Image: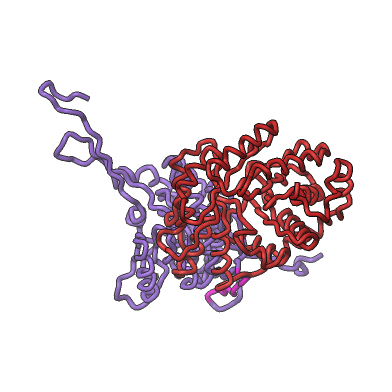
Amino acid sequence: MPTTAPAFADATASDSALRRFLFGLPGVDAVGLEARAAALGTRSIKTTAKAYAIDLAISMIDLTTLEGADTPGKVRALAAKAVNPDPTDRTTPRTAAVCVYPDMAATAAAAVAGSGVKVASVATAFPAGRAALDVKLADVRDAVAAGADEIDMVIDRGAFLSGRFLKVYEEIVAVKAECGEARLKVIFETGELSTYDNIRRASWIGMLAGADFIKTSTGKVATNATPANTLLMLEAVRDFRAATGVQIGVKPAGGIRTTKDAVKFLVLVNETAGEDWLDPHWFRFGASSLLNDLLMQRQKLSTGRYSGPDYVTVD
Amino acid sequence: MSENNRLGVFKTYKLYVGGKFPRSESGRVYEVTDSKGQWLANAPQSSRKDARDAVVAARKAFGGWSGATAYNRGQVLYRVAEMLEGRKEQFVREVAASEGLSKSKAAAVVDAAIDRWVWYAGWTDKIGQISGGANPVAGPFFNLSTPEPTGVVAVLAPQKSSFLGLVSVIAPVIATGNTAVVIASADAPLPALSLGEVLATSDVPGGVVNILSGVTAEIAAPLAAHQDVNAIDLTGADAALAKELEIAAADNLKRVLRPQPVDADSASDSEDWQASPGTHRLTAFLETKTVWHPTGALGAAGSSY
């Protein structure tokens, strides 16, 4: 499998080699990490910089609906919003993608066709990931066949937490092989990994296995993306590029609801991974209600008066 | 230790937003003096972001408060009057200092304010009868009109009557189920900020009343232009400011209550707050919903429903 960077070929040779490599990663200074994330969150971003940040954040959104109650109509409405987020202001950038369940991928693909908005589909028995590998791979094949440009997979947290790292690694490799042209985002569900050290280890497993993106969470558990765990993953992709030259994207998802939060994440990106990641190709927000807040802030900047939820669409 | 050696404990007056007592987001305060210019306290000087946060809190509280039964709102408002009664001395002191009244006159004003609150508490489940009802129509329909609260109301409290006037503008707004963002009198904000403490310890849900102190024009301008504010009461504005705010409020068709005449010079506090208030402040922030209910075909055999 050519996905693993040559520099780390030994690391994934066997379960024990991978374990040795992961436990050889430097430990995370939890207090320092949280302090740095909090400190970077205090930057004051105003006026033109804020306008730039808002437009950038809109263009980085994976506009998401992952509900049991999703209907084709709702997905089409969401796709229309992704293509044209604010019909009253055509200068508003479109979002990066719409993110749906595999059975809705075809509907979404038809709705965004020709607009430049990508279709991301979750797969591999999202959000729990508790299914046989064959079933997960079939799920991925199904989504890719339906026209998904990006696949959001979940790792097997049960295997990870019980120390079977190679199983996690091989599963990602197998899913990557099914993806074909589609870009692969690997979700760690950081809220279930217990420690920052585990998040760092999971990041490296994902990157070694050929992920195009590493993603914090599904949005389905209590703790989702936080500035600290996103900062940690940004450090991982920075270090990985320094070691191998391969750039990998980061996607925090879940719990990012306000413009202020989004701008804080952009500051983290700029200060940690650098400007190269300030691009929808390399950084995404998994969000749904965030877009409305960004649009209201955008309207405030352009008109000078505070906007309200009556002036943006509900979904 | 003798009584004279005791250090004074000064009160930090704070805003009341969303049921909490924040300082101004801007960190600013300004000096509040009594009618003779003696320093009383520092009050927070709110910024437009405090106004924005207050609107968010008021909007969040609107569903619950407007959805409560009128009977329940009446009980809650009566509870506020009970709480005011218990803290009467403090309000008498603050009103006497800020308005330059004698203690007995200030006590009369506070009594009137508590009575005013009780009076409005009684109106919650009666306003529907006087401003709504069955309409006679020429067709086979029951036609019923019923008043509904307008939404988030920005209230510019009177500048001179710092407590009776304040109560007289807040109580009618929330009695009918609206939520309020109140700008206290700029020179005499202390009774308003203390009222926040009373509301917090009554059963009024957080966010139903939000109280801001500071420069009236600075806070009122963003509220008047705010797209998520449904109405504005311009009682505390002078003529020039009222005109400016009314223009800004037209942008999203806010309901505007402008008591002062259009050509008045500045006398914004000409209203006699001691007089019986009538119901115009209750009806100012209501929307009328009318329902046409078919009675069914009136056939040869008579009514069929």
Q: Is residue A16 left or right of residue B292?
A: right
Query: According to the colouring, which chain is purple?
Result: B
Q: Is residue A288 left or right of residue B266?
A: right
* Residue A63 located within the stretch drawn in magenta: no
Does the image show residue B181?
yes
Residue A90 point in image, percent of width and height: 42, 63
Residue that protrudes farthest toward the front in the picture? A2
* Residue B30 located within the stretch drawn in magenta: yes
Q: Quadrant of residue A258?
A: bottom right
Residue B31 point in image, percent of width and height: 59, 75
Name the quadrant of the N terminus of chain B. bottom right
Does the image show residue B65?
no
Q: Quadrant of residue A18?
A: top right
Residue at 56% across / 39% down in the picture?
Answer: A102
Residue B42 point in image, percent of width and height: 62, 71
Residue at 62% across / 35% down in the picture?
Answer: A138
Colour assigned to chain A in the rendering is: red
- The answer to whether residue A66 is above or below residue A8 is above
Q: Which residues are magenta?
A: B26-35
Q: Nearer the viewer, residue B34 or B175?
A: B175
Name the quadrant of the C terminus of chain B. top left
